[in-house]
Image (cartoon, helix red, strand yellow):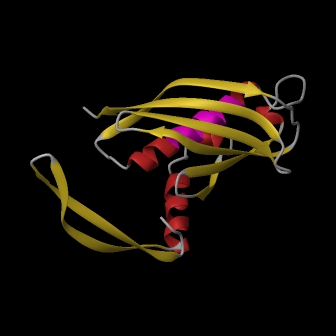
Amino acid sequence: WVWGSQRLITKFFYLRKGHKIVPFFYVNLWLTETALEKSDILKEINSKAHNTLMSTLSIEFTEIGKDFIVCKMPVNNKVHQPDGILHGGATAALAETVGSVASRYFINDDSVSVRGIEITTNHVRSISDGFVFAKASSIHVGRTMQIWQIKITDEKNNLISMAKLTTLSIKKK
């Protein structure tokens, strides 16, 4: 996708002739994505937060791109550990949230449910106030398994934590 502009895609279809594969025909497609559609997607994602952990932690999705999604969470006493700094569990919940939504969005298959099956989070810096931003970038997006790298940074882009999330797509019953 190219947000706010158009991109020409040429799709080739091939035919096998003996041991050779030769072009059979092609189709030109114009793809258009606009900033309005991007904001509508973010609005739809954020609307699903009501009465969930996302609303409890005040997680808000702010950006979406070709292969990434970003959300933010305020750092305040609701997400502090007793020492007055961001709790690692809140950070892991933020990472799993952004990675799971990324899987749901990028596999784009309503016949499956997404489940987190493994998360690892390394905390490298503490923070006591402001916002943290979680950016999920794809490592692998397969039909049944997706792996995401999630960087959690502060408002000055300092690395707070690094997470890796593996999700599984399973057929709905």
At x 81%, y 32%, the residue is 86
Rendered view: 44 above or below 100: below
At x 83%, y 39%, the residue is 76
Q: Residue furthest left?
A: 18
Q: Is residue 112 visible?
A: yes
Residue 51 x, y percent position in the rendering: 55, 41
Residue 64 x, y percent position in the rendering: 57, 57
SS assignment for the magenta stretch, majority: helix
For the record, the magenta segment spans 91-101
Rendered view: 69 above or below 112: below
Q: Is residue 65 covered in magenta?
A: no
Q: Quadrant of the C terminus?
A: top left
* Residue 129 placement, left or right of 106: right
Residues 154 and 49: in front is 154
Residue 49 x, y percent position in the rendering: 55, 46
At x 80%, y 39%, the residue is 159
Q: Is residue 52 visible?
A: no
Rendered view: 17 above or below 28: above
At x 29%, y 65%, the residue is 11
Residues 5 and 104: in front is 5
Residue 39 x, y percent position in the rendering: 55, 66
Q: Residue furthest front?
A: 19
Total marks placed:
0
